[in-house]
Image (cartoon, helix red, strand yellow):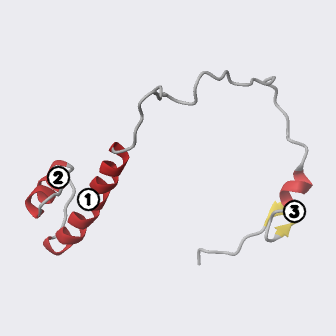
Amino acid sequence: MSLDTATVRRVASLARIRVEEDELPRLQTELNDILGWIEQLQAVDTQGVEPMSGGGNQALRLREDRVTDGGIQQEVLANAPGRADVFFSVPKVVE
């Protein structure tokens, strides 16, 4: 399947995306590449493969729900590029 410029313009209109005329050829190429990739996926033989939804039939491992402070303040601060006492130190970005 290949999209022409008029179809790309219509898709952009339906998606409420403003596309300038000079951007249409690039967008057309990208959409055609995506559709070509989908055609490749459709060529894959999936006979005998059951459809999946989500991660399968695995139950989630639960843990006790309790509040802690983590107790690893020094380990966390070791990742800081700079620190001031027990705080992350970052460069000033607002003048």
Q: Amino acid at mark 1?
A: Leu
**Residue under label 1:** 31
Q: CA distance from mark 3 to mark 2?
A: 50 Å
Residue 59: x %, y % from top left: 67, 21
Q: CA distance from mark 1 to mark 3?
A: 46 Å
Neighbour tally class for label 3: few under 14, some 14-19, many 20 plus, Cα within 10 Å: few
Task: From the viewer's side, name the closer residue of 23 and 59.
Answer: 59
Label 1, residues with CA under 10 Å away: few <14, some 14-19, many ≥20: some
* Residue to which mark 2 is pinned: 11
Toward the bottom, the furthest residue is 95
Please name the residue shown 42% across and 35% down the image. Answer: 46
State which mark lies toward you, 1 or 3: 1
Viewed as shown, does residue 53 lie left or right of 43? right
Mark in front: 3 vs 2: 2
Marks 2 and 1, the one that precedes in the sequence = 2
Residue at 81 percent of width and 71 percent of height: 82
Disc 2 residue crowd, few under 14, some 14–19, many 20+, Cα 10 Å: few
- Could you say where residue 92 lies in the image, as x and y percent from the top left? 67, 75
Residue at the spot of label 3 = 78
* Disc 2 to disc 1: CB gap under 8 Å: yes
Label 2 and label 1: CA atoms lie apart by: 10 Å
Give the camera-side residue of 1 and 46: 46
> Residue at left 75%, top 23%?
62
Q: Residue at x 17, y 52 (%)?
A: 11
In the rendered structure, find residue 90 and report the number of the disc placed on it. none
